[in-house]
Image (cartoon, grey):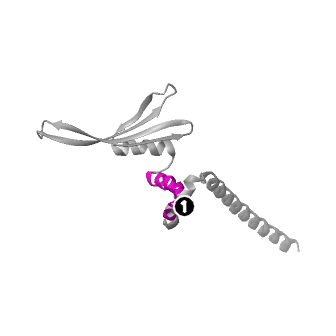
Amino acid sequence: MVEFEFGYRGSAYKWFRSRKEYYSKRADTMKVKDVHECYQRKKDGKWELLCSGSELRVKEQAEQLLGLTCEQFSQVVVLPQGDFLKLLLANSRDKASLLQTLFATERWERLTRRMRDRAGSLSKQAGQNDAARASIVSREG
């Protein structure tokens, strides 16, 4: 069994992965299945089941909660433990994606795009104004 407990934004969470044996009547044999669960601790100290089922479903719950992919989370958790080399050796796209998520740069990217669009619009307008001025000057002499 693997158990991972952590705190995030004032709440405690626990993720479990375990293997359970069960008897399959159809196959007439014992089988093993993986069990994935995630819990949140309530104010009374009891654990509330947030999600259970497939690995994908529990993984999506974690990504939704943390705002990081599994790979990004692993990198962030490992960084404080001294594995900075992994971040340094990551390709540019992965490195940029991780750093953008960590530092919430999306808002600044939107602002940069709006400013770039506005600058382009003002530049075009200035060019039209210059052309109009030149036309008036040449006509009026």
- Left or right: where 139 falls relative to 42: right
- Say which residue label 1 marks: 96
Measuring from the top left, give residue 58's x and y in whole percent.
Answer: 39, 42
Report the front residue among 61 and 39: 39
Characterize the magenta stretch by its predominant secondary structure.
helix
Q: Quadrant of the N terminus?
A: top left
Q: Quadrant of residue 30?
A: top left
Question: Was residue 135 drawn as part of the magenta stretch in this picture?
Answer: no
For numbered disc 1, what is the local secondary structure?
A: helix
Measuring from the top left, give residue 116's x and y in whole percent.
Answer: 67, 60
Work out whether 140 lies above or below 35: below
Mark 1: give few (<14), some (14-19) or many (20+) Cα within 10 Å.
Answer: few
Measuring from the top left, give residue 71's x and y in whole percent.
Answer: 45, 55
Residue appearing at x 47%, y 37% in the figure: 13
- Left or right: where 52 falls relative to 127: left
| Count of numbered badges drawn on the protein | 1
Question: Was residue 79 drawn as part of the magenta stretch in this picture?
Answer: yes
> What amino acid is labelled 1 in the image?
Ala
Work out whether 115 lies above or below 53: below
Q: Quadrant of the C terminus?
A: bottom right
Work out whether 106 lies above or below 39: below
- The residue at the far right in this view is 141
Work out whether 4 lies above or below 124: above
Q: Which residues are magenta?
A: 70-86
- Left or right: where 116 falls relative to 92: right
Residue appearing at x 53%, y 35% in the figure: 11
